Amino acid sequence: MNALLQLPVARLTRTPRAWIPMAAWSLFAFGAAVALHYASPSASAGDALQTAFGALALPLLAFAVVGVTLGGDGLARSVRSVVAFGAVPARAALAEVLVAVAASALLASVVGILVATLSHGSSDPPLARDVLATAWIAALGGAAYASLFALGASFGARGGGRAWLLALDWMLGASDGSSGILTPRAHVRSLLGGDAVASLSNVASAGMLVLLAVGFAALAVARSRRV
Amino acid sequence: MIDLHGAHTRTKPVTIPPLTVRLGAGTHALVGGRTDGVAVVLAICAGQLSLHRGTRRVLEGRDDDGARAALAYVPLDAALPEPMRVDEVLELAAAIRGEKTRSAESRLQVLGIGALATRAVRSLSREEKRAVALAEAVTSEARVVLVDEPLATIDSRAAAMVTEALRARARAGACVVVATGSIRDARALADDLLIFDRGVLVRRAPASDPLILAGPRGASVRVVASDTKRLAAALAGEASVRDVAFEADVLVVRGIDAVAIAAALARAAVRSTVTIESLVPDLLHDDELRAAIAGDAAGAYRAAFERAQHASVAPRVPSAHTNGSPT
């Protein structure tokens, strides 16, 4: 399994061109946080986190991370080169999904922390508590989104399903009703201080994000059993 | 080592009807063009295509994971991990197969491409990537080596090295299966030839079988010449020619072995000083005809050309309609 992690890690760390969208969405989140903070001093960190970060930057960061990790290809095609060396397709796909999930969670967490810090207002809870809460929520959201997009990448030769699932998440996740229950967007919004999804508690929403991350990843790997 | 039982799949460009075949240690060639489905059968052997019906067993029914690690597959469009260097790719492949890491340069040198060891994969041409994949496959400890068109896109010196490397793997006990559209390549690469026609296995014979070059229904060659009647007369006495017929201005020459027919036509053209305008095999691939012209008949033409120069009448070398195939 360790050997199989090398390829997705190499894709992430050795493709500087692919870092551009990640940097762009991070800068967008920071810029929005700063702008919101100075435009409306009464605004809380939660506002910046829910709008610019949770609704836009987080999913798009995860989208970019998954794209880079899979080499811009569909999940099945992205493991072709190692499968020819005797790797089991499902295991190779699992390695790629794990790297994408971990990288997305880490990046989302770092960006989330910076956004929370930049937009921290006087009426917000203590910064340390806010940052800590944002870190785990962003990490969970990043992981769930990466799994969702990995599943999307298992549709279409070039993984075009990613874009469809991004659109679906935006449409269904906008609602706080039961239609949003299977979307990371609704749960991330709820955890960042927005409306609860289908009256679920924060703990339940966090649990749902974990379930979505595991479930989408499992489905993606299952769809890649044969290359 | 590979057992296909009633293996049936539908894919573009061909449907493989239920196919039962067993391939043991040694060298095997699946012979046929793209539309004959040899690449599809190779992909089935590699476990890259799902079967609609039937079963595929590799390495006496070992579990699929173990079988995969003991299998090396080089398709025509071999993909290598893009962000890595070639030596890292070979290390990765060894790690996946559970083999000891060896010097990348020495592994690549089997095909004379040791200099590529430190190159980044994304800087390689398509042909170089394929050569690296091929070198990895033939120097691995995989017990089953599957290669699609191993001699395509490489020069003749590399072709000899690939042939030797694949045969060496077979001598070491591996099951080597190649897919090729050229019978000449197949005979060079393998001892066991499986001829496919539109997805159907029509013949299986040792490469030494002289009849292997015949198509499933025998062979025939259509000839357009400056004087077909004189050419037909000159073919009398050629053992490889079963009969001749005229279809308008085209002379149809039938026999068992199209290569032998081509050689007979070459000799007859020289004897009768008839110019052959075109020569089209009905059943064989163009590569085979070209091989015949380049092989047996070349000497005859060279001699005829020299004789003709003395006599100031130069015969024209017959032209086959070729498709630019690498052989």
Image: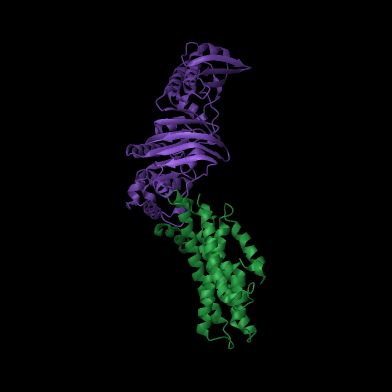
Chain colours: A green, B purple
Residue B327 visible, this angle: no
Quarter residue B158 falls in: top left
Q: Nearer the viewer, residue B264 or B139?
A: B139
Write the residue at 57% across / 51% down.
A157
- Spot occupied by residue B269 in the image (x, y as percentages of width and height): 50, 17
- Spot occupied by residue A34 in the image (x, y as percentages of width and height): 59, 80
- Spot occupied by residue B231 in the image (x, y as percentages of width and height): 54, 14
Horizontal side of residue A163 vs B32, given as left or right:
right
Write the residue at 51% across / 83% down.
A129
Write the residue at 59% across / 88% down.
A123
- Rendered position, A120 above or below A197: below
- Rendered position, A208 above or below B172: below
Horizontal side of residue B14 vs B189, given as left or right:
right
Q: Nearer the viewer, residue A58 or A94?
A: A94
Write the residue at 55% across / 29% down.
B321
Residue B53 visible, this angle: yes
Task: Assign the N terminus of chain A to one quadrant of the image.
Answer: bottom left
Horizontal side of residue B297 vs B52, given as left or right:
left
- Rendered position, B231 above or below A190: above
- Spot occupied by residue A153 in the image (x, y as percentages of width and height): 56, 57
